[in-house]
Amino acid sequence: MTLTNATPFIAGNWKMHKTVAEADELVSQLMAASADMMEAEVVVIPPFTALNKVKNTLCESPIQLGAQNMYWEDQGAYTGEISPPMLVEAGCRYVVIGHSERRQFFGETNETVNKKIKAALYHGLLPILCVGESLEEREKGETMAKVGRQLSEGLEGLTPEQFSQVIIAYEPIWAIGTGLTATPEQAQEVHAFIREKLSENYGNTACSCAIILYGGSVKPANAFSLLKEKDINGALVGGAALKADSFIELVKESIRAYREK
Ligand code: PEP
């Protein structure tokens, strides 16, 4: 499957929210609005316990399924972990790797992120690699150095062909779940840097097609201005993805931005 940024890519990360019944209700509401979201790649990312039920409900729907994390081994004595084949079996196409909450609370490093990316690709899962700086790093002028390192270490050893299956999400940590959003200009600056940096390793053609998402308090009110920016191809959404109305509106605003780009 070839990834393209010709349409907006909007993924809703439900984090540790939604029981199976609640997840099913939310995805049913989203499916009812599928016709309004056809011009976007829409992905729902429920907790592990709801993957199976959501997949069954989605059935042939164009809405895609993703997981929030995985371990890099296929199986073994790794209590509490989930393997790539388990996610494939559950019907996932995408998997989030290296979310800042995983890095901050669960000790993920660029090295473990790299192992997970390689394992995901090996099993045909499309990884969404999250990168981003803290407020302190931004204030010290270290944003590009931090993001650059997360990219080079997280993607270490990937061939251009493997890279073409990876989605990048730029998520400034200070903007996640805080209500603070990077301005479109701040986000665009980092997105342009990411595209430029990746083209050094993977070539201009691959990088002009690469999907680079922005994440950090994206909501219906700011999706249009963010997605109008040249290098912003979509959004990874937390809070605003938990209610059908706001998520659907956000997808519609993203489509509107893309039409006017
Ligand atoms: C996220 O979960 O990746 C995220 C960006 O959350 P929020 O939209 O709530 O800031």
Image (cartoon, rainbow, N blue to C red):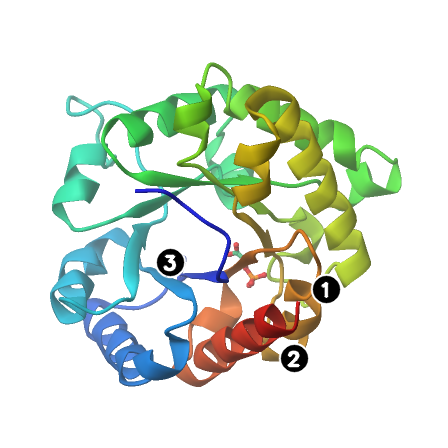
Percent position of residue 171, x then y: 62, 49
Which badge, 1 or 3, comes first in the chain's sequence?
3
231 or 52, nearer to the observer: 231
**Residue appearing at x 76%, y 27% in the figure:** 145
Q: Hey, which quadrant is residue 200 in on the image?
A: top right
Percent position of residue 245, x then y: 44, 85
According to the image, label 3 marks what residue?
16
* Quadrant including the C terminus: bottom right
**Residue appearing at x 27%, y 48% in the figure:** 93
Q: Viewer-nearest of labels 1 and 3?
A: 1
Q: Are marks 2 and 3 in contact (CB under 8 Å)?
A: no
Q: Viewer-nearest of labels 2 and 3?
A: 2
How dense is the environment of label 1, judged by Cα within 10 Å: few (below 14), some, or many (20 and up)? few
- Report if residue 18 is visible in the image: yes
**Of helix, strand and loop, which one carries label 3?**
loop
**Residue at the right extreme, as displayed:** 140
* Quadrant including the N terminus: top left
**Of helix, strand and loop, which one carries label 2?**
helix
According to the image, label 1 marks what residue?
180
**Of helix, strand and loop, which one carries label 1?**
loop
Residue 221, numbered circle:
2
**Residue at the front extreme, as displayed:** 205
**Label 2 – label 1 distance at C-alpha:** 13 Å
**Label 1 – label 3 distance at C-alpha:** 21 Å
Answer left or right for 34 relative to 87: right
Q: Hey, which quadrant is residue 81 in on the image?
A: top left
